[in-house]
Amino acid sequence: MRDVWNTEGLIALDKAHCWHPFTQMKDWCAADHEPLVLVGGEGAMLRDSRGREYLDGNSSIWTNLHGHRQPEITAAIRDQLERVAHVSFLGTTNAPAAQLAGRLSALLPVGALPRVFFSDDGSTAIESAMKMAIQYWQQSGSPKRGRFVAFDQAYHGDTAGAASLGGIGAFHDRFAGHQFPVHRISDPDDLENLPVEEIAAVVIEPLVQGAAGMRLWPRGLLRRLRECCDASGMLLILDEVLTGFGRTGTMFACEQENVIPDFLCLAKGLTGGYLPLAATLTSEKIYSAFLGRFDEQKTFYYGHSYTGNALGCAAALANLEVFRTHRVLENLQPKIAVLSDLLAGLASRKRVHEIRQCGFLAGIEVRDSEGTPFPWQARTGGRICEAARKHGLLTRPVLDTIVLMPPLCTTEDQLRMAVHAIGVAIDEVCGDCD
Ligand SMILES: *Cc1c(COP(=O)(O)O)cnc(C)c1O
């Protein structure tokens, strides 16, 4: 059965009323711009209102793991919906949230991060960690520790606190006067020059900075950072909003350097990409600093209306169950190798400047034949992604880096198709670039 969609009508309504994120709406609303209206999905594929199909090449902005309409996740959400969709986590609890907290803690070494604080998205997972870190130090005899350290080109979300940590000029400079105090570094060695006794926590995206264009950290950097934090007492917040849940080849990126953070922030893939839900995991040491008599005012006064949402938690439980029953991480390893081989085939193209792969995610950066970046105003990466649609791949670039990080369930044939689409699209757009 195929629905019939009034594509023109939907686009007219959208252009009349919607305001899209990270989008210049003047271009969006231009008469010659026809946005895709996505109406269906199956596995790693998406379908638009005109019946065209695409590989979901960026996992619907880095969220989807096991594909669309995945039967177990769909059933779990449906079952929970038959009971109750949402109840407040302020003053009551619910079954899927309690079970999920236990399951998430159990993904880490025993006792490492036993406490789970739920919120709604990556930004709020980070905000929660930041506020916990500041309050932790206030309640642990070091109230001067109120500053943060973040890295060049970092991205930790768009709410005000999380955006303070961001190091991408185009997104963050404008709000510079409205921020938490942050020191910016490019390497753990830079910590030597900072007043570490005033720093609450260091925040990093482990192994790979996503929004910076899939920028890879040198191996060992995360381990070194953990050691610096241990030596100076600073807390370590790991932002695994992107890297969590298998993207880098292991359940969490931090496993690859044997690092356990003080806070682990999870979102995007937590529900398999089905519903907005986030979690901030922390240690018993941090948690216990918030315990006291009611009138000692050590309570963590933070929360959102949808905290611990039952549908989201049910989806997340099903997500973890799919990892187990379908042996997702095991089956992913050969596909990571296939992806490497396919990407190596792109490397010889003249405009391909660098290919950065970490597990099942990759960035393909194009530059002109001299190795100089194209002027950003030319939107070269954007135009390549638009061209790739005609060859069956839907993705978005970061500037001139084409992001390829499809759902973990993507087949080898689909990977082949995606990499082929990128190659052809680069030729089409850059054939006469410089
Ligand atoms: C997407 C992202 C965030 C923000 O998550 P939202 O759900 O969009 O608020 C934070 N950190 C990283 C590393 C991300 O990729």
Image (cartoon, rainbow, N blue to C red):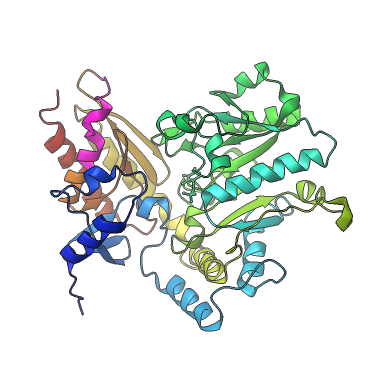
Q: Nearer the viewer, residue 180 or 247?
A: 180
Q: Quadrant of residue 147?
A: top right
Magenta residues (range): 371-385
Say whether residue 314 is visible. Answer: yes
Please indicate whether residue 434 sits to the left or right of residue 47 in the image: left
Answer whether residue 306 is magenta in the image: no
In this rendering, the answer to whether 168 lies above or below 160 is above
In this rendering, the answer to whether 170 lies above or below 283 is above
Which x, y percent locates residue 25?
28, 46
In this rendering, the answer to whether 334 lies above or below 192 is below
Which x, y percent locates residue 201?
67, 35
Q: Which secondary structure is most common in the magenta stretch?
A: helix
Direction front: furthest residue: 16
Q: Residue at x 83, y 51 (%)?
A: 297
Answer whether residue 383 is magenta in the image: yes
Q: Quadrant of residue 396?
A: top left
Q: Nearer the viewer, residue 328 or 367?
A: 367
Which x, y percent locates residue 162?
55, 41
Please indicate whether residue 79 sits to the left or right of residue 389 in the image: right
